[in-house]
Image: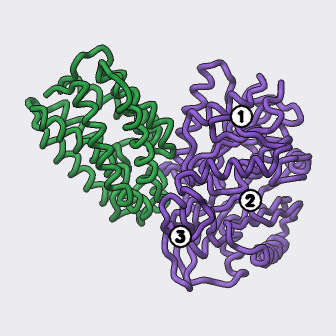
Amino acid sequence: MKKIVNDPNQVVQDMLKGLVAAYPESLKQVPDTTVVVRKDAPVTNKVALVSGGGSGHEPAHAGYVGAGMLDAAVCGETFTSPTPDQVFEAIKAVDGSAGVFLVIKNYTGDVMNFEMAAELAEAEGIRVEKVIVNDDVAVEDSSFTTGRRGIAGTVFVHKIAGAKADKGGSLEEVKAVADKVVANVRSMGMALSPCTVPASGKPSFELAEDEMEIGIGIHGEPGIERKTIATADEIAEELTGKILEDMDYTSSEVAVMVNGLGSTPEMELFILNGKVQDILAEKGIKVYKTFVGEYMTSLEMAGCSVSLLKLDDELKELLDSESKAPAFRI
Amino acid sequence: MELHVAQALMWIERTNEKIQENKEYLSALDQAIGDGDHGINMARGFQAVIEKTSSSEYETVSDVLKDVAMTLMAKVGGASGPLYGTAFLKMSMSTKGKESVSQEDLAEAVRQALEGMKQRGKATEGEKTLIDVWTPVQELLEQSEDLQPEEIKKTAKDAMEATKNIMATKGRAAYLKERSIGHLDAGSVSSYYLFESLANVLEEGN
């Protein structure tokens, strides 16, 4: 393992110190926690958004804390969901008495820890609502499994629900729009190389020089299929094709996100995006806005994900409204 | 068969030793079908548990179990934190007010722990999770008269090994479907360590 770390068991604390120091005008850390909140938290009478998960997905989630997006991000250990007490601290730190909305990615641990925190908050009289994001089409959605994972499409939920709350939406209204985003967003990812969690020191899986893993999540876990590496165009076809198979985007307008997983250069993401745009154009799907870059990474994993969000007028307006989050400025 | 405060503390110490010794093995098991952090998380959690329990004074088994629960919940994270945290919390609540814990009390405590975990994880038996180890152990505790600790160990071990042939439908391994077959469930292995340690402590107490 070759990494710029001190004690592998202290990476989250060390990261938070540097993160908050990088954005002193917009972020602050709640003392003795792994919670990052807006500098001006709590905002009175505004529904507060809390999200989070394991660390290692930077800029998710703390990079999305700011006016117009999240009020707090709870940072767990690397790839490990934060504990209920930490999520509870976040809820308390941002509650502006209009209620707190939790954005949870559909991983067993995240769901359990956030639900326990919600129970603790409700016991103290704080109103809490939640949405569980499950945009990953790589895994089958069946009643026999835990359901689909939440991956990069979660950033659209942060943006749009955050905008709704910023405009004075009630807890119910924020929930309704977040549910709408979840119903209309789909993603799929692939990896060219694994990543190394600092505390374990070993790559999360092994991939031969000529292999790629299709349908990976964002925790260095294996995907659904391993095959010989293809061209950028073929990868774009496979990822986009699977998304279009899952949801009918015919004659709709979409937001596109081509997300890098940590060590894929923008050059390659742009190459991929070029083909994604061609595919959508061929299908008569109109692209309203495109985001290319690193939004939800897996440490230094090489690879990417593609997300499509079907838009209506309300979602377009909320997507376009101002965000002051360090990693997502509009 | 009785469990007193000293034995409860010993149980936790032994479990911690097993977890620390097998930290990398647990992570490797998890890496095959999950995300590879089970060993790291459990080792971090139990290390914190030992720091807490070794610096505290206890009058009841219930208080020991409660500190274990709260520490695991606050330090483990992932899916294991809420599940093991819930298990110990339920066992603490179930044994509250008892000076010593009999086999009957233990059976009831494990039953409530199991119920709590099923509810928390929305899981049931046969899904390749730690529930598959806790269920047969609970049944054994409830049904056997004059139970020998060796039987707890064997039941937990067999159940743990049986998870190898199950296709996961809960937890992160569920995403792999058929590819999850042939691998042990990491949570079942850590649960086996827990029951193996319990059996060893009970054996020494007899």
Residue A101's label in the rendered image is 1
Q: Position of residue A1 (x, y in %)?
A: 53, 70
Mark whose residue sits in front, 1 or 2? 2
Q: Please state, as top left, top right, bottom left or bottom right, where the N terminus of chain B lies in the image.
A: top left
What amino acid does circle 1 point to?
Phe
Query: Mark 2 and mark 3 in contact (Cβ < 8 Å)?
Result: no
Which residue is nearer to you in this view: A146 or A109? A109
Q: Is residue A9 above or below residue B199?
A: below
Question: Which comes sooner in the sequence, label 3 or label 2?
Answer: 3
Q: Which type of secondary structure does the marked residue at label 2 adopt?
A: loop
Question: Which comes sooner in the sequence, label 3 or label 1?
Answer: 3
Residue A25's label in the rendered image is none
Q: Which residue is mark 3?
A: A1
Q: Which residue is mark 2?
A: A295
Mark whose residue sits in front, 3 or 2? 3
Per the rendering, the colour in which chain B appears is green
Q: Which type of secondary structure does the marked residue at label 3 adopt?
A: loop
Q: Residue at x 42, y 66 (%)?
A: B179
Q: Which chain is purple?
A: A
Q: Position of residue A287 (x, y in %)?
A: 87, 64
Q: Chain of mark 3?
A: A
